[in-house]
């Protein structure tokens, strides 16, 4: 099982580091809406995981910015189709 540690960045568009994440805020708010991420497999593809329960799909977040945990698993749609979990700040493939 491959593991990639999260790298927190201010702007996901300026990096291709596998597993990098950027917290994104709700429009005109300080509330975190979800994360943008670079696929942990190394393909360079960007993804979006919303935390809003009113949207589907949506992920549960533990609230820890340094060591985030998300549920359920993440499936990168299109391209490489990486599948795994983000747990305690580490991406782990299934």
Image (tube, rainbow, N blue to C red):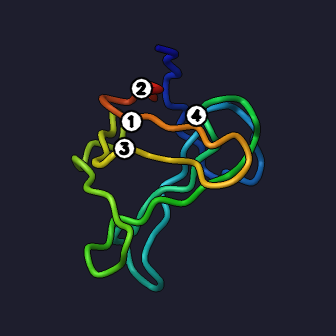
Q: Helix or strand or loop: what does disc 3 sit on? A: loop
Using the rendered view, name the quadrant where residue 28 is placed. Answer: bottom left
**Mark 4 vs mark 2: which is more N-terminal?**
4
Rendered position, 87 above or below 46: above
Task: Name the residue carrying label 2.
Answer: 90
Using the rendered view, name the quadrant where residue 69 is placed. Answer: top left
**Mark 2 vs mark 3: which is more N-terminal?**
3
- For residue 86, the mark is 1
Q: Helix or strand or loop: what does disc 4 sit on? A: loop
**Mark 4 vs mark 1: which is more N-terminal?**
4
- For residue 19, the mark is 4
Task: Decide: few, some or many residues near mark 1? Use Cα within 10 Å; few <14, some 14-19, many ≥20.
Answer: many
Q: Helix or strand or loop: what does disc 2 sit on? A: strand
The quadrant of the image that shows the C terminus is top left
> Looking at the image, do the residues carrying marks 3 and 1 touch, with CB atoms under 8 Å apart?
no
Alpha carbons under labels 2 and 3: distance apart: 13 Å
Residue drawn at x 54%, y 60% is 48
Task: Name the residue carrying label 3.
Answer: 73
């Amino acid at each position: 099982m491959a593991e990639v540690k999260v790298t927190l960045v201010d702007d996901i568009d300026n990096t291709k580091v596998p597993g990098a994440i950027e917290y994104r805020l709700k429009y005109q708010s300080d509330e975190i809406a979800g994360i943008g991420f670079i696929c942990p497999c190394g393909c360079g593809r960007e993804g979006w995981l919303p935390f809003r329960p009113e949207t589907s799909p949506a992920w549960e977040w533990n609230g820890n910015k340094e060591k985030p945990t998300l549920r359920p698993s993440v499936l990168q749609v299109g391209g490489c189709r990486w599948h795994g979990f983000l747990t305690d700040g580490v991406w782990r493939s299934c």
